[in-house]
Image: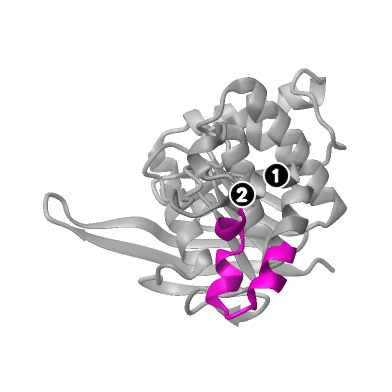
């Protein structure tokens, strides 16, 4: 029986806006993320993907329903979760090693111990030791994103939440980081919830691709293909076609009974 690491039960999140009044970013949504698997959320801007990620991170609270991690209600940020954003959010005035170790510093871990752990994860993300003493502005975009990933991993979270972490990178750097991320995940599988606008990225990285529209789930695809994957493989081409077809569906489909459950489950 699969272990569920993250579960959204009848979750809704409503925001009050000056121009449009009350707006539901997410409405009556049920979703589970299996432990040790990569679940990817795809959908248009404004469909609620990042809202779900913030709820899972404990940075926001649902208006209705509940969010659980390992059976416990998420009531706020927890040490068991690592968060990686598109920008990386590194502090420009801090050296790389201190950016990476920041979470441990906030928990009161002694300097020598947190720096030793930061150097270990720096090696895991394939950055040379001398980078530890650099500042973020001295690094390339790919190196900065590796540093941000190292910071998310430094406190050894069992759940990793990623909000378009590769979107700002050039194609070659993005492809290289895709491969390195999967190698890192395979060496120590964590539960990953990844948000992306890229269908190719989703099918290459995920065990499961979930399509969102208008704050609800509209389709759900299991990806059984072995890694590493190639988007030009026949099964990947077919999966790309199916996911893109689901994305083209009218947002009104989100009000259907399928969207209120797990979506259309298709094994690839």
Please say if 7 is above or below 144: below
* Magenta region, residue range: 97-117
Q: Which residue is mark 1?
A: 130
Q: Is residue 102 magenta?
A: yes
Q: Quadrant of residue 42?
A: top right
Give me the disc on residue 72: none
Binning the other alpha carbons within 10 Å of mark 1 as few (below 14), some (14 to 19) or many (20 upward) gives few
Q: Mostly what secondary structure, the magenta segment?
A: helix
Q: Which residue is mark 2?
A: 133
Please state which of residues 80 and 47 is positioned toward the viewer in this rendering.
Answer: 80
Left or right of 180, for residue 143: left
- Element at badge 1? helix
Residue 235 screen position, x and y as percent: 80, 26
**Residue 15 drawn at (x, y percent):** 26, 61
- Quarter residue 165 falls in: top right
Q: Is residue 221 visible?
A: no
Residue 117: x, y in percent? Answer: 73, 64
The percent position of residue 166, horizontal first and vertical second, equals 58, 36
Query: Judging from the image, what secondary structure is the residue with disc 2 in?
Result: helix
Marks 2/1 in contact by CB < 8 Å: the verdict is: yes
């Amino acid at each position: 029986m699969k272990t569920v690491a993250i579960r959204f039960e009848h979750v809704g999140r409503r925001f009050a806006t000056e121009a449009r009044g009350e707006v539901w970013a997410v409405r009556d949504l049920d979703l589970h993320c299996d432990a040790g698997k990569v679940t990817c959320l795809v959908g248009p801007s404004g469909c609620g993907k990042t809202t779900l990620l913030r709820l899972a991170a404990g940075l926001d609270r649902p208006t209705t329903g509940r969010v659980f991690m390992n059976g416990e209600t998420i009531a706020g940020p927890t040490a068991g979760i690592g968060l990686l954003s598109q920008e990386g959010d590194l502090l420009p005035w801090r050296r790389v090693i201190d950016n990476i170790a920041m979470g441990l510093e906030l928990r009161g871990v002694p300097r020598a111990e947190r720096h030793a752990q930061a150097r270990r994860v720096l090696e895991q993300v394939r950055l040379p030791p001398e980078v530890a003493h650099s500042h973020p502005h001295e690094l390339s975009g790919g190196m900065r994103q590796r540093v941000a990933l190292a910071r998310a991993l430094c406190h050894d979270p069992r759940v990793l939440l990623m909000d378009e972490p590769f979107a700002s990178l050039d194609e070659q750097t993005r492809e290289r980081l895709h491969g390195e991320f999967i190698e890192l995940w395979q060496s120590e599988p964590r539960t990953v919830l990844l948000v992306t606008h890229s269908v190719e990225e989703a099918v290459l990285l995920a065990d499961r691709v979930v399509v969102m529209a208008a704050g609800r789930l509209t389709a759900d695809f299991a990806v059984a293909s072995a890694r590493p994957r190639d988007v030009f493989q026949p099964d990947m081409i077919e999966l790309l076609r199916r996911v893109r077809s689901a994305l083209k569906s009218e947002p009104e489909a989100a009000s259907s009974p399928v969207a209120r459950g797990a979506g259309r489950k298709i094994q690839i």
